[in-house]
Image (spheres, rainbow, N blue to C red):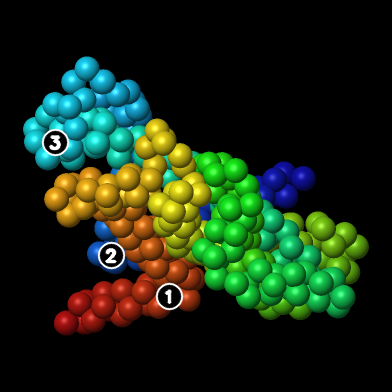
Amino acid sequence: MRDLKVFKNLFASERRSRTLSELKLMFNVLRRSPTGVLGLILTISFLVIGIIGPYITPYNPIFIDFKNMHKLRLLPPSLKHPFGTDEFGRDLFSRVLSGARVSLLAAVVVLAVAIPLGLTLGLIAGYYGGIIDEIIMRITDVFLAFPGLVLAIAFSAAFKPGLWSAILAVALVWWPSYVRVVRAQVLQVREALFIEAARALGLSPWKIMIRHILPNVLTPVIVLATLDFGSVIIVTSSLSFIGLGAQPPTPEWGRLVADGRAYFPEKWWYVLFPGLAIFLTSLGWNLLGDSLRDVLDPKYRRRLEFKKEIKKEGEKSG
């Protein structure tokens, strides 16, 4: 009994050591990628601003000072108003900071709906196959037959215009890509020897899918979710831009660009700064997602480690 306990402790220690080694390798891969580091900085900045933005705004992003509106409206960027002001005299810097939370909320809710739904349907379709697979994949193909933005506009137009209507519309069209990715991974994993062993032990299909298959299909899902974060922000901003998303006075980035286009190019700051926020946020998530492909790829990490060992051996021999 004591020997078994010692063996378990040694096994747990070895597993922790291997996990730490893998995490160190991941960090080294990310550190070697300048675009990945830039993406990480941009995404962390967006997340921080999205969380604390409304609490650090120098002005109320919604309040309109009707008394002084004629003096404050459409002022250019200055020390007092770094991003200028809008047509109602509201500080654009405060509105852009508050808009980060709206965009963060939209992306989180859409992916929180799309990823679990796509994972579940992809696991079921890939594992069971047959008629179940056919039904799920034909429904998925129907959604994928239309451009995502066009379908989101159609769903959003069917609802009452508003932020939550736009979020729901985007969530309804975002899950099919996860179904296809997960199903493709499950088809590769389900014939592996460890899955056959799990079946031989009498485990139920759901236990096999959740305990043994799911952990092996998460890597591409994480990468896709990172890339989708920026895409969701662009699509929700697009819906707000055409009037189907956030409604005034909500300080949403796409809505700000839509309001500012009436004064462009004379009042260029009204469009530039909200548009720049959308661009930098989407760029950050795309750069990070692209780098995560290498970070989460064990073969790439092993090649990097092998090259590092060869270099060390060459330095020693030299």
User: Viewed as shown, does residue 67 lie left or right of 43?
Assistant: left
Residue 116 picture quarter: bottom right
Say which of marks 1 and 2 sits in front. Answer: 2
Which mark sits nearer the N-terminus, 1 or 3? 3
Q: Amino acid at mark 3?
A: Leu
Residue 307 in view in this figure: yes
Under tag 1, what secondary structure?
helix
Q: Position of residue 86 (x, y in %)?
A: 24, 37
Quarter of the rendering occupied by the C terminus: bottom left
The CA span between labels 3 and 2 is: 36 Å
* Residue closest to the far left: 79
Could you say which is closer to the camera, residue 83 or residue 292? 83
Under tag 3, what secondary structure?
loop
Q: Amino acid at mark 1?
A: Tyr
The CA span between labels 1 and 3 is: 52 Å
Which mark sits nearer the N-terminus, 3 or 2? 2
Query: For mark 1, what is the residue?
Result: 300
Query: For mark 2, what is the residue?
Result: 35
Which mark sits nearer the N-terminus, 1 or 2? 2
Under tag 2, what secondary structure?
helix
